[in-house]
Amino acid sequence: MAVPHQQQHQFPLPQILTHPSSSPALLITQGAEGRLYKTTHLFPDRPCALKYRPSKPYRHPILDARLTKARIAAEAKVLERCWREGVPVPAVYAMDAANGWLMMEWIEGVPVRQAINEYLGSGESQEGQEEAEELGDLMRRIGRVVGALHKTGVVHGDLTTSNMMLRRQEGEQKGVLGGEVVLIDFGLAMQSMSDEDRAVDLYVLERAFASTHPRAEKLFGMILEEYGKSFKKATSVLTKLEDVRMRGRKRSMLG
Amino acid sequence: MALENVALEHVPSGYGVYVGFFRDVTNADFLHQQLLSRNRDFEYAFIDASSVISRLHLLSAVYSALNTLLVGALRTPNVHSEIVTSFNTNNNIADAYRRWGITPGKTKDLIVVKIISPTAEGQNGFSATSARTPEAIWAHLTEHVMGKPVPVTDSEIAQATDWPKVRKYYRLNGVPALEKVADKAEHQRKMEQLAIMGMALRGL
């Protein structure tokens, strides 16, 4: 075994990750606002995701501290609300909003985007009828989960197939599209019950499908069909989606 | 010796976490009195085990308090009282002491946590006089806590847990995520997770 990962850290670690742990923290993604590390919570056999929002040197320190704290707290609140309501999202393990970090359950599995690409790229999709069946099943599961999310009064804000995981249960053999759909990354989420916000969530997902899975696009209708059945006001959201499609994600600033 | 040294992830070297468990404690009044009089020999977190779900639940509170100590944000006199308040889902300190702390005449099963810090003795809210080695801590505890020492395991904690109380403290009644969970172990795991989430989001 070579030297530990330490030298690979191109960004300074958050203070909490500078303390000893059984395995070094692994940088998973680096976004505009924050970083995601894979590390451990309390015990070596309890993996977790640590979301860290570093302070921004260009912001006034007081404003910076306030924004960081409010955003971490908002994300944690949304996750807790979803979890309590039974929507599949990562559980919150620990948080220090003032220091910009949030520890969450590690979801074992692959993003839906990757699973679909693997499925379409492999021979599994060449069986005609079966293809529609397996993909269709995944679409319906996505529709149900998004419906459950909106039902609780939360909109995701960045609903893409990269922000949905397929959770693998041990000993499960269901092909690449198997597993429970779990929503992740609630950094842009907000609490809203409006048709408009919900429709925009669906629109963003539709665009993501169109741009990343051209062959799966025709299946998007199955997501909407299942979504429409998932809660009472869903049908009016689908009507609103028509308007959003006509004009795009941003509401007109005119009039 | 039933005092356990717990190695937690992300704790700076030099810090030690020791936990012990006493069942059927008969002198809760005396122990409570030592805390009230700020007797510096009794720098322990005394936790009423009937309000605790599991090791994971207990150690989540310990870790939260340790982090608060490390970032210099203690809101109570020391890391031990901070452990007790870390169990709460709101910022009411008196409330936390009543629910998770030792209560005279009531506490029967007592979990004890002792944190050792590498900083100079007598600083940072740490006493210069209280015991520091595991042997000395255990000797001091067994001398003053009148109860039966048992290991701090999930099964020992489970025997002491008062679920109606825990459900009330963490508002676990009528939670949709807990409905239709037929498997008892899965149900308890979800309640434990909801409690830990409530603690993580304290005051929000």
Image (tube, grey):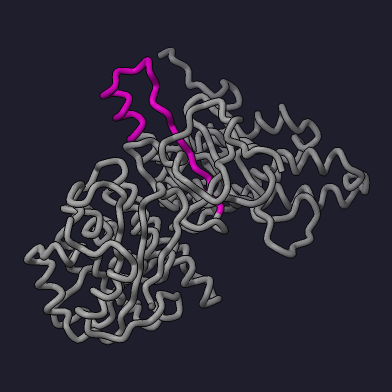
Magenta-span inclusion, residue A58: yes
Q: Quadrant of the C terminus of chain A?
A: top left
Q: Pick whichever, B170 or B124, lies toward us.
A: B124
Left or right: A198, with B160 as reference point:
right
Task: Please say whether residue A100 is visible from this viewpoint.
Answer: yes
User: x, y percentage for residue B76?
Assistant: 17, 52
Please state the total of marks drawn on the protein image: 0
Which residue is at 21% across, 59% downward?
A: B81
Q: Quadrant of the N terminus of chain A?
A: top right
The image quadrant that residue A15 belongs to is top left
User: x, y percentage for residue A192?
Assistant: 41, 40
In the image, the segment drawn in magenta is A47-69
Which residue is at 42% across, 68% downward?
A: B55
Left or right: B52, with A238 as reference point:
left
Q: Pick whichever, B141 or A59, lies toward us.
A: B141
Q: Pick whichever, B91 or A16, lies toward us.
A: A16
Which residue is at 27% across, 87% downward?
A: B24
